[in-house]
Image (cartoon, rainbow, N blue to C red):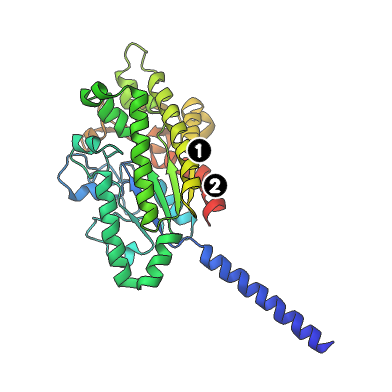
Amino acid sequence: MGCMHVLGLFSIQIILLLALAAETTAKVPAIIVFGDSSVDAGNNNVISTFLKSNFKPYGRDFEGGLPTGRFCNGRIPPDFISEAFGLKPAVPAYLDPLYSISDFATGVCFASAGTGYDNATSSVLNVIPLWKELEYYKDYQNKLRAYVGDRRAEEIFSEALYLMSLGTNDFLENYYTIPTRRSQFTVRQYEDFLVGLARDFITELYHLGGRKISLTGVPPMGCLPLERTTNIMGQHDCLQEYNDVALEFNGKLEGLASQLKRELPGLRLLYTRTAYDTFDQIIRTPAAYGFQVTGMACCATGTFEMSYLCNEHSITCRDANKYVFWDSFHPTEKTNQIISQKLIPILLAEFQ
């Protein structure tokens, strides 16, 4: 009887240890970010472009009240996601000289405001193209191997959660603004062209060790204040054409995710409509989320609104929590938080 009791306790201990080991290996050790201004934590601060946000009033609600280079009054989605996974509350920019590999070991951002899948998009405002973001990631891999050793580094690469958020600039900054791509592609052909570039990027990231990837599509682009300001004939309502393109493009990204999961063994690629759907709901029923203003930005110029025209001389609202948008292109911290809160349970269920 005593032996049976001891064996029973031993079995329970073994099960608990196995469960703990499984939990430890399943844990996401780092958040790694690629994309545009929706997720840029400040990489544009140190490159030669005028598309920056490292000045007031940006960052006024961030910890310390200082501008970091985030295109927001406070935190952006990767920050909330990182915190939800038990990591740090803000993911640092790779090019920020204040941080080093010890900081980047649990999370790093390679994103650049103004970039897109298309290299031609990054050329418009001289920002970091997506291929260069991947080159920085390779550099990071080498530094991490030197810092934690090859074995631990490979574990981090395969267990990290990779966030991808871009595509809006390809349409608004490039396709609909500069005639070159419109002369080469119909909008549907351009969507397919971008999806092909997304496929190439994700495939290369996979071959570099990435396995857990969250792919975010574009928001309701026609409802950005920048687009509503210029929609004079539509009485400054959302541009439905742009929203239709966003939905169509997002649908193609969703199809790409399904294809790649079949083609690449062990790839856990998640496309979720949550970001678009939540943004759309907020704009349609702002009061339900505590917002009062959807068509104008908190930080505005009073004329044509573009993010980099939001500065210390701009007319800035007192309470950003009442506004869906911080500037004419980017959501407030509150909007980012609401969208993140809808997305986080899905990410935890899939990747943690």
| CA distance for labels 2 and 1 | 9 Å
Residue at screen point 33% across, 42% down: 72
Q: Residues within 10 Å of mark 2 (few under 14, many from 20)?
A: some
Q: Can I make out residue 39 in this image?
A: no
In the rendered image, the vertical position of residue 99 relative to residue 268, given as above or below:
below
Q: Position of residue 237 (x, y in %)?
A: 39, 18
Task: Tell me the element at label 1.
Answer: helix
- Read off the residue under disc 2: 346
**Looking at the image, which is closer to me, 181 or 100?**
181
- Three-letter residue code for mark 2: Ile
In the rendered image, the vertical position of residue 346 relative to residue 299, given as above or below:
below
Q: Can I make out residue 251 in this image?
A: yes
Residue at screen point 17% across, 48% down: 47
Q: Quadrant of residue 309?
A: top left
Task: Tell me the element at label 2.
Answer: helix
User: Which disc, if any, is residue 48?
Assistant: none
| For the residues bearing labels 2 and 1, Cβ distance under 8 angstroms | yes
Tally of marks: 2
Q: Where is residue 338 in the image (x, y as percent from the top left)?
A: 48, 41
User: Which disc, if any, is residue 274?
Assistant: 1
Residue at screen point 48% across, 31% down: 282
In the rendered image, the vertical position of residue 55 relative to residue 280, given as above or below:
below
Q: How crowded is mark 1: few (under 14 residues within 10 Å), some or many (20 or more)?
A: some
In the rendered image, the residue lying farthest to the front is 263
In the rendered image, the residue lying farthest to the bottom is 2
**Looking at the image, which is closer to me, 81 or 270?**
270
In the rendered image, the vertical position of residue 347 relative to residue 100, given as above or below:
above
